[in-house]
Image (tube, rainbow, N blue to C red):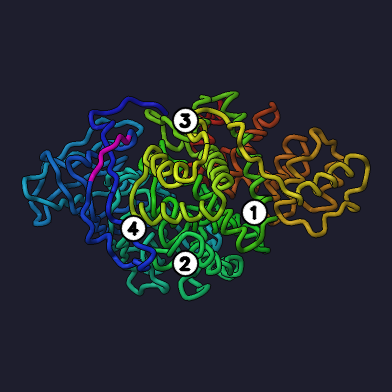
Amino acid sequence: MRASYSAFAFTGCILFVGCGHSSETNAIADDHKNATLQITTIMDPHSHARPQEAVITHLDLDVTVDMVAHTIAGTATYKLQRSSGDSVVFDTDGLLIEKVTLADGALLEYSLGDSTFLGRALRVAVPAGADQVVVSYRTGANARALQWLSPEQTADKTKPFLFTQGQAILTRTWIPVQDSPGIRFTFNAKVKVPNDLMALMSAENPQARSSDGVYSFKMDKPIPAYLIALAVGDIAYQSIDERCGVYAEQSMINKAAWEFADMGRMVTAAEELYGPYRWGRYDVIVLPPSFPFGGMENPMLTFATPTIIAGDRSLTALIAHELAHSWSGNLVTNANWNDFWLNEGFTVYFEHRISEKLYGADYSAMTGVLGHQDLMSTVMEIESGKDPQDTRLKLDLAGRDPDDGMTDIAYEKGYGLLRLLESKAGREKFDTFLRGYFDKFAFQSMTTERFVTYLNEQLLTPNKLQVDVDRWIYQTGIPDDDIVPVSDNFAKVEVEIAHWEKGTPANQLATKAWSTFEWMHFLRHLPGKLNEARMDELDNTFHFTASGNSEILAAWLEQCVSNDYSKSYERLDGFLTTVGRRKFLIPLYDRLIATEKGKAMAMNIYKVARPNYHSVSVRTIDDMLGWSAQNGTITL
């Protein structure tokens, strides 16, 4: 949705300078606490905040979660650093502001700006010398960060569940906050929930249930608002090693702990590559299947979809990705959402390095090829129907929801640039450069321009390297010097596809040792049109429709829709109704609406499935289908 900006829009965000850590002294100690805050103002078109006047440095959150009324209510107390002016501006969206006071209870005047897709600016008049404000509030009926699940929507089917998803600009729907990735602050929280449930946050977490339902949290490293996360449910904990563990519903905990047994090895591998893990513990919570993403890198507690639990540890590269965000994203953060590639491109590169270290070059090659296939598909889609400018790494998302920029461009084109830089510099020099980058800019926010300057000064110029970085970052499409990944394993898969096309029975193909990735490549490269007999042969031989591996099942269901293989439509219906991960939803709905029969199926499925999806997925699928929430119709 596009909307005009209120008077408070197009302000700034800040870059935190001088609050990093030294890996030589293993300074996981709190040197950032004593750092002098220096401010550089840049434009953030997605926040009303005016950090050049007053910026938050610490949050004390005290809230009660009502699982019946579906509300969060309480107070947000902020410490401020003030530079100029007589007010502080927060982002809100749908919040009910009850009062704003000083720490001593004295009432403060406040006003709310016009409502836009950014929400409403909350401007609070603050007297000279005051450095704290207390906002009393409650969430509204349509807080888009929150998904309230009934017991029937959970794995255990016994108790309700709540989780938040703040990225990109949704934290403002459950906390009044300066909601820009360039504004970092520490927080403490006290959260009251029903005493038969557990609460967890992106902070230091309990490992056992509180008898009174009151939980206290501490995050003493400065993080941006989008990384504040909360989950409430009937949750159990199981340790992996001394600093890693898994949270999940009771029926999922043993499966999750087995699946993620390599978490500790991943942390060690990451540290060996790019320096100390600076967040203390690294835990993962497996959420109900409506979670819209594969994972979310909330500090100290990755939120993960159950669709990565395949029973064979084949999909845990996603955990490597979210762990890598502990450096690229959480430690060094994109300053605003136009610079999103700085989070995701670096993280995909780092994910590949962790996976290669643990599972070998063949593994990394296969995931690289699949990612590049996704990239080229995204480029074709954008160039054919959207703004080609969205194929640039440095985006211009002013006037648009920043969620529009969260595509494979940021992830895979960003990875492609870093892979090219590695090939030019050599792995040893590039590793030294990246480790220095994470150390120098730890707990800071980064713009594309600031990164390019550092890249030129520290890597390209000293080593006399010629790379057209501007072509990659500021121009559209994929540059000619892109290094296209190749996989010997996939070449063997293509041989078997050719054999099948020429008449070799499916049960005689050499598939015995195939991993998830080889099956995905196989399914993605089947002939364009297959009749029912050929689909029957594949399904009867390989049992795709019955697969418990979500990646394989989703790839197969795409083929079923394209070939109108109705024998799998019941599984398609069930999959789309229960799984809310956008990665699977978008291609399946897209294939459905390509035909009149599919359009009718999409409408019938979506009517039932829509209440099970998080607002992030709902927005995307509503737009795809032309869905009218008012009358429950689709206008294609």
Q: Amino acid at mark 3?
A: Tyr
Q: Secondary structure at mark 4?
A: strand
Query: Gap in Å between the C-alphas at discs 4 and 2?
Result: 16 Å
Relative placement, left or right, of 281 versus 530 is: left
The residue that disc 1 covers is 364
Query: Gap in Å between the C-alphas at discs 4 and 1?
Result: 42 Å
- N-term-proximal mark, 3 vs 2: 2
- Looking at the image, do the residues carrying marks 1 and 2 touch, with CB atoms under 8 Å apart? no
Query: Gap in Å between the C-alphas at discs 3 and 4?
Result: 45 Å
The residue that disc 2 covers is 235
Q: Amino acid at mark 4?
A: Val
The residue that disc 4 covers is 65
Where, quadrant-wise, is the C terminus in this rendering? Answer: top right
Q: Residue 474 shows which numbered tag? A: 3
- Which residue lies at the image location 31% right of the left edge and 40% below the top edge? 94
Say which of marks 1 and 2 sits in front: 1
Which span is picked out in magenta? 39-44
Residue neighbourhood size for the residue with mark 4, other residues' Cα within 10 Å, grouped as few (<14), some (14–19), many (≥20): some
Let me know if residue 157 is in the magenta part. no
- Looking at the image, do the residues carrying marks 3 and 4 touch, with CB atoms under 8 Å apart? no
- Which residue lies at the image location 20% right of the left edge and 40% below the top edge? 52
Compared to 116, does 308 lie above or below? below
